[in-house]
Amino acid sequence: MRHTAMVLVVTSCLGVFACGQTTAQTAGQSAQQTAVQTAEELVNKNIQAKGGLGKIKAAKTRLTTGKVKSGGRRRVTVAAFRQMNMRPDLVRQNISMQGMTAVQAYDGSAGWQTQPFRGRKDPELMGEDNLRDLLLAADFDGPLVDYAEKGNRIEYLGHDMVDGDDALRLKVTLKNGDIIYYYLDPDTYLEIRKEIQQFIRGSVRERVVDLGSYKPVDGVMYPFSISEGSTSSPGVQVTTIEKIEVNVAFQESDFALPASLRTDEKKSGLVGVH
């Protein structure tokens, strides 16, 4: 809401200005409230389009498997992808190729990884900056569901275009200050694109994620095609989901820090990073 400060010499005009200012403030507050309600309405429609909050919350664990294709024109790699999610915020991602498997996992307090493709086979703790993407993956229902309880803020930005098609643009500011712009299909209210901005040490890390090929799993709609990349090189990585299973039997130990890292975790102060 815009506030304007004015100094008026003519006394008779003061009453008129005060009334006008009050009206402008009221109109601004009303417009702001309408914008918030519109954003909440879009979030609710998105949740309903996915199957409704009841069905979404019915899933306690989720196993996603598929293939990840990445690289440019000269060199293309294809790897097997496996992601395990467990409420409230546990996640483990495996990328397997050429007989090796890279792991990134978050146990609810700290993140850890193994990177054999970089010659680092021993598990190591993840720093806060590298943990940003994994924390997004750990959010079982995504930033829109229970957004207020998670400390996220939403704002409706109106209509925009995605590859020549109309879309509804929603801004989500996460609790940590990062921003996700959601583009919703105006007919289905499902996400068709996300633009992610992460603010790290004074710089901005951006990427674009396109979503499609939605299919129902236990009454909930999930995208089975995910294309992502930087704003300058979109689509350099394409994930094709082959199967999604919910309420698979997982154990917390599947996500837990390896024994070799438990002492290091306490020393690092990374416990409780969110």
Image (cartoon, helix red, strand yellow):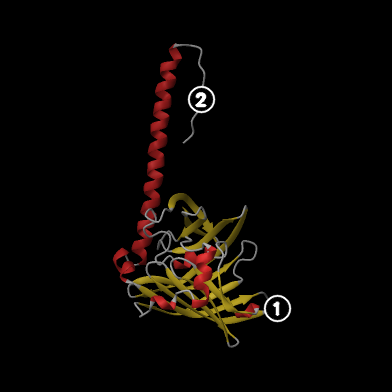
Which residue is the extreme one toward the bottom? 99
Q: Secondary structure at mark 1?
A: loop
Q: Amino acid at mark 2?
A: Ala
Q: Amino acid at mark 1?
A: Arg
In this view, the residue in front, 208 or 93, is 93
Image location (x, y in percent) of residue 115: 59, 77
Q: Residue at x 52, y 73 (%)?
A: 261
Which residue is the extreme one toward the right? 74
Which residue is the extreme one toward the left? 54
Q: Write down the quadrant of residue 14 in the picture.
A: top left
In this view, the residue in front, 98 or 229, is 98
Instruction: Kindly indicate whether the residue at mark 2 contacts the one at mark 1 (C-beta within 8 angstroms).
Output: no
Up the image or down, 120 lies above or below 234; here it is below
Up the image or down, 77 lies above or below 49; here it is below
Mark 1 and mark 2: span between their CA atoms? 61 Å
Q: Which residue in the protein does label 2 denote?
A: 5
Q: Which residue in the protein does label 1 denote?
A: 74
Q: Earlier in the sequence, mark 1 or mark 2?
A: 2
